[in-house]
Structures are given as structure tokens and as C-alpha cells.
Image: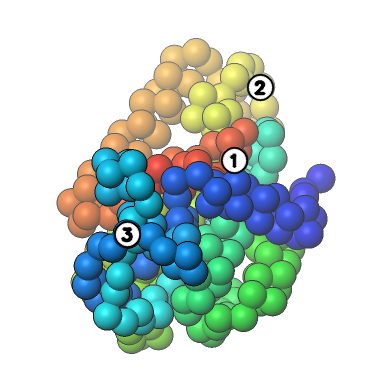
Amino acid sequence: MMQTKKAILVKTKRKIFALHSGNHPSIFESRGIDFREIKEYTFGDEIRKINWKVTAREQSPYVNRFNEERSLNVLVVFLVSGSIFFGTQKLKQESMAEVLSALSYATLHQSDYLSTLFFSDKEEFFHAPTKNMGSLERLLDVALTLNPLSKTVDYTALNTYVMNRIKRKSLLFVIGDFYGDVDLSALTARNEVYAIMVRDHFEELPKLRGEHTLIDPNTMRQISFSLSGSQLKAYTKRLEEQDAHTFAHFKKHKIKHTKLYTNEEPYEKLFELFRG
């Protein structure tokens, strides 16, 4: 049974607040700023502007000062395919909803513009740019209730859609399990792109032997087959090769990425991604 949107929201706020209380002013630092100087902290300065490196070196708090702050444009893309309706610890769809919640909350918390796109081979749902924190409940409701079965991701269609719809330079976060011929190259032309790959350990190292009947969640076709040890090795090797190709694509186009499994929570992984 999937978590409720309320449970995910409560956990998101708690986890991000806990990390915020440490040496992390936000889940990602704003790029929409014009840096001016570093000055010693005085009462009333915003905690999120503390320069932690200088503070550690000087053993006294220092903050960054800026000439102006401009709101970031953030687009979160939730890739909808039948394969996300799978998981041994929890559904990949649920883990993806947690990632969406963390990214959305962090964006709205620092008063940046958030757009959200659910996409398969076409638009499933689009939420126009907003700074309204109340929109997060609606987005989580879509993420948890949208039926992904019989759907597949068309990356060519995704590239075309985003380039035509999103005109302003954005921070673009793509969440999915990234099977198939992944291509996000067109999105990097005017955006800073991050990819969050969500997987389940079982699909990478399946422990299946003998006769089985499975349903392909992308096509809903029923398949009966027999698996041997050599076939499992061949499957694992093919998946590793496919993922290596995907990671090479990310590296070539300077797409920062991380992998999250369904038995992990996303918060630290996301902080590591943005710090790296």
C-alpha cells in the first residue's frame, strides 16, 4: 500500500528541515543571484545566506551579500511508464513521488517558480509555473494516483514538448527509471539538467529460476517463459550495458545524475547530487 500524500509531505518537511538545520542552507542553491561580497554575520541576516566554508575557516559566521535576487525557474519532469509500477520495498512510482515532493518543496520554500510535467509519450499532466506552496498537495496527488500502466516514455517527444513549452532558461529535474533509448540532449541547450534514476534492486538482480508468467507493464502483454542461470546473467549484462550507455550520454551532455533505490530515502542523495 502506497504512502498517503500527507505522510510524504510530513516526511519531506521533517527531513529537509533537519538537513536545513545543518550545513545546508537549501536543497540546492539559487543561481538567480548577483554576488557582491562576503560580510560578517549580524543579527537579522538570513541563515540560508551563510557562507559555510568561510565560517568554518574564520570560526565566526559570515554571510554572502548580493546586489539582487531573481527567482529561479524550476521544471520537474516525472516520467510516466508502466515500468514504474513495480517495487519490492515500495513502488518506484512512490519513490519518484518522494523525489518530486523534496524538489518541489525546496523550490517553493525559497520562493522560486515551480513548473511540473508528467510525461509518457505525451503530456499526462502539466502544472503551470507557481510559487504557491499549496500546489504541492495537488502534485503529489497526481504522482500517486496517475495510472502508468500501458504507457512508455518517448524521449524525442519529451524534448520537443519541453523546448516548445518552456521558453525561459530553467533548472530541469527529470525523474524516472530511464529504460530504453534515453536522450535528453536537446534539453541541455538552454537548461541545467539533472537526472534522478529510480530503480528497484530486484529488477537489476532478479532472483527468478524456472517457469514464470509475467505481464509487461508497458504493453500489458502476458509472457510465459523459463529462466536459467545463464539467461539471468545475459539479462544482467544487457541491463548493465544499457545503463552504461545512458550514463555516458549524461556525461557527454553534462547532465548531473544520481541513482535511488526503492529501499532508500531521497533526501541525502539529492543533497549529494547538488553538492557534487
Residue occupied by mark 1: 265
Q: Mark 1 belongs to which amino acid?
A: Glu
- Between the C-alphas of marks 3 and 2, the distance is 69 Å
Q: Mark 3 belongs to which amino acid?
A: Glu
**Of callouts 3 and 2, the N-terminal one:** 3
Residue 179, placed above or below residue 201:
below
Which callout, 3 or 2, points to the residue nearer the camera? 3
Residue occupied by mark 2: 211
Instruction: Name which quarter of the figure residue 5 lies in.
Output: bottom right
Q: Residue at x 38, y 60 (%)?
A: 41
Which label belongs to residue 40?
3
- In x, y percent, where is residue 6? 78, 59
Assign the N terminus to one quadrant of the image: top right
Q: Residue at x 64, y 75 (%)?
A: 133
**Of callouts 2 and 1, the N-terminal one:** 2
Residue 66, placed above or below residue 98:
below
Residue placed most toward the observer, 10 or 114: 10
Element marked by disc 2: strand
Instruction: Name which quarter of the figure residue 51 lies in.
Output: bottom left
Element marked by disc 3: strand
- Between the C-alphas of marks 1 and 3, the distance is 36 Å
Q: Residue furthest top?
A: 229
Residue placed most toward the observer, 165 or 182: 165
Count of picture labels: 3
Assign the C terminus to one quadrant of the image: top left
**Of callouts 1 and 3, the N-terminal one:** 3
Q: Residue at x 58, y 74 (%)?
A: 124
- Between the C-alphas of marks 2 and 1, the distance is 34 Å
Which label belongs to residue 98?
none
**From where the camera sits, is residue 120 visible?**
no
Horizontal side of 222 relative to 130 (left or right) equals right
